[in-house]
């Protein structure tokens, strides 16, 4: 009986050792995989907030992994490896070869219509019709509710750079601080961050501290002179 108990105890210790070994590997790799993680994210043209949403965590939590402040748990490591198409060893800096699971794109792509140009600065006249141009985007935007606008101006820099292609989801509402495509006075539109006010007005503000802000009155909104065209889901930059 004592022999069986001894064997069970040894087996238990071996399991603890294996888990501890993996945990120590992650801890000892602290900082090393973070640069790799940042590079992989930029290759995907994803923001930290988008990565956090995809992983089911906050943007702040994801940022701690890139900055080397905290270590991702094993389940998050596996999710990231699956998304980027690399091995966990590559993320941990234990392997210099990515070991991609296949040589094909990891995500299918679709083409979105380009509906003209929008100003990230002073509102300009926007042509709200298809230009005949199409741009490739992740297939997740292929629900028929997304289109693209070419960004002109730097009021949303560095979040959305001048010349990039903003991917817009068509909807007439937004959450506070979301970036919106906002139409006013007919055909004039601008790209700004959305701040609803307690008196029913809306403050539109750029991320660039030198950019102008605009206050949309409650009357303008009720009269239909100003409204949200859609929210910015992502953007892409063509090199």
Image (cartoon, grey):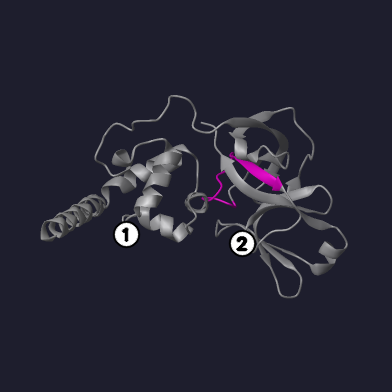
Nearest to viewer (mark 2 / mark 1): 1
What residue is at 42 percent from the left and 35 percent from the top? 85
Residue 81, image x, y percentages = 39, 41
Q: Main secondary structure of the magenta part?
A: loop
Hey, which residue is sitting farthest top in the picture?
A: 103
Residue 87, image x, y percentages = 34, 37
Whether 55 is drawn above or below 148: the answer is below
Q: Nearer the viewer, residue 220 or 143?
A: 143
**Which quarter of the picture shows residue 103?**
top left
| Residue topped by disc 1 | 69
Sequence-earlier tag: 2 or 1: 1
Binning the other alpha carbons within 10 Å of mark 1 as few (below 14), some (14 to 19) or many (20 upward) gives: few
Q: Assign the N terminus to one quadrant of the image.
A: bottom left
Residue 93, image x, y percentages = 26, 42
Whether 19 is drawn above or below 126: the answer is below
- Is residue 161 shown in magenta? yes
Residue 200, image x, y percentages = 76, 71
What residue is at 64 percent from the left and 49 percent from the top? 232
What residue is at 61 percent from the left and 62 percent from the top? 177
Give the Cα separation between the discs numbered 2 and 1. 26 Å
Magenta region: 155-169
Residues under numbered marks 2 and 1 in contact, where contact means CB atoms less than 8 Å apart: no
């Amino acid at each position: 009986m004592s022999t069986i108990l001894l064997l069970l105890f040894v087996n238990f210790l071996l399991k603890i050792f294996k888990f501890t070994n993996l945990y120590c590997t992650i801890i000892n790799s602290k900082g090393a995989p973070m640069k790799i993680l940042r590079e992989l994210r930029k290759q995907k043209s994803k923001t930290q907030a988008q990565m956090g949403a995809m992983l089911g965590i906050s943007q702040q939590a994801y940022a701690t992994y890139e900055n080397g402040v905290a270590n991702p748990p094993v389940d998050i490591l596996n999710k990231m490896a699956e998304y980027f198409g690399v091995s966990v060893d590559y993320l941990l800096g234990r392997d210099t070869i990515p070991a991609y699971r296949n040589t094909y794109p990891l995500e299918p792509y679709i083409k979105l219509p380009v509906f003209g140009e929008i100003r990230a600065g002073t509102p300009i006249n926007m042509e709200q019709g298809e230009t005949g141009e199409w741009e490739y985007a992740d297939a997740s935007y292929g629900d028929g509710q997304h289109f693209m606008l070419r960004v002109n101006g730097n009021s949303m820099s560095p979040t959305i750079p001048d010349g990039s292609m903003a991917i817009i989801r068509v909807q007439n509402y937004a959450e506070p601080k979301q970036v919106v495509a906002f139409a006013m006075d007919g055909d004039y539109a601008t790209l700004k961050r959305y701040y609803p006010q307690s008196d029913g007005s809306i403050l539109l503000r750029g991320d660039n501290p030198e950019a102008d802000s605009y206050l949309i009155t409650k009357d303008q909104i009720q009269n239909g002179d100003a409204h949200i065209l859609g929210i910015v889901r992502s953007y892409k930059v063509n090199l």
